Amino acid sequence: EDVNIVALSGIYETSPVQTQGGYFLNAVASVETTLEPLQLLKELLRIESALGRIRRHGGTDARNIDLDLLIYGDTVIDEKGIILPHPRMLGRRFVLDPLAELEPGLIIPPTGITASEAATRLVDSSPDQEVRRLGTLEEVSKHWADS
């Protein structure tokens, strides 16, 4: 396989940001891959499409799935079709909280700060955004199955 999931953060419930609708579920996965960054991004978009996601240019509509490529090692890219690290990740608790759980010491290029430091700074600067850890994937799945 070209992509293998190495680790998965807990599942987080997050209030909507810059969109209408209900709460979102968020998680971060660490993967090993032989794909180059643009190939990996295209694979994520293919998966979204296969799951029924319709992307609208500049849209912030509610969606059934949203897969983003956040970081690719220490790679920094800013070109048509791909920007790494993800250009809005440092302003999103629903990204940084699970990232900090999964890999707290991960250095976010080119900032030089760790995922944990970035998450702490954002919590302090945006306390009104609701982000709540629900549990592991297994715990959340069991809860829904039992409901």
Image (spheres, rainbow, N blue to C red):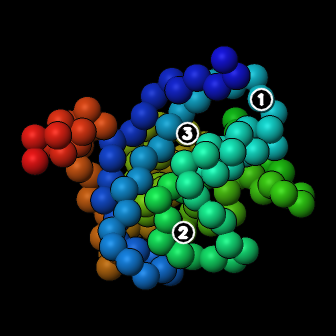
| Residue drawn at x 33%, y 68% as measured from the top left | 23
Q: Amino acid at mark 2?
A: Gly
The residue under label 2 is 91
Q: Nearer the viewer, residue 54 or 2?
A: 54
- Which comes sooner in the sequence, label 3 or label 2? 2
Q: CA distance from mark 3 to mark 2?
A: 17 Å
Secondary element type, mark 3 = loop
The residue under label 3 is 106
Q: Nearer the viewer, residue 30 or 145?
A: 145
Q: Position of residue 101 (x, y in %)?
A: 38, 42
The residue under label 1 is 35
Q: CA distance from mark 3 to mark 1?
A: 21 Å
Q: CA distance from mark 1 to mark 2?
A: 27 Å
- Which comes sooner in the sequence, label 3 or label 1? 1
- The answer to which quarter of the image holds residue 14 is bottom left
- Which comes sooner in the sequence, label 1 or label 2? 1
Q: Amino acid at mark 1?
A: Leu
Q: Position of residue 145 (x, y in %)?
A: 17, 40
| Residue drawn at x 43%, y 63% as measured from the top left | 93
Q: Nearer the viewer, residue 58 or 113?
A: 58
Relative to 7, 60 lies left or right: right
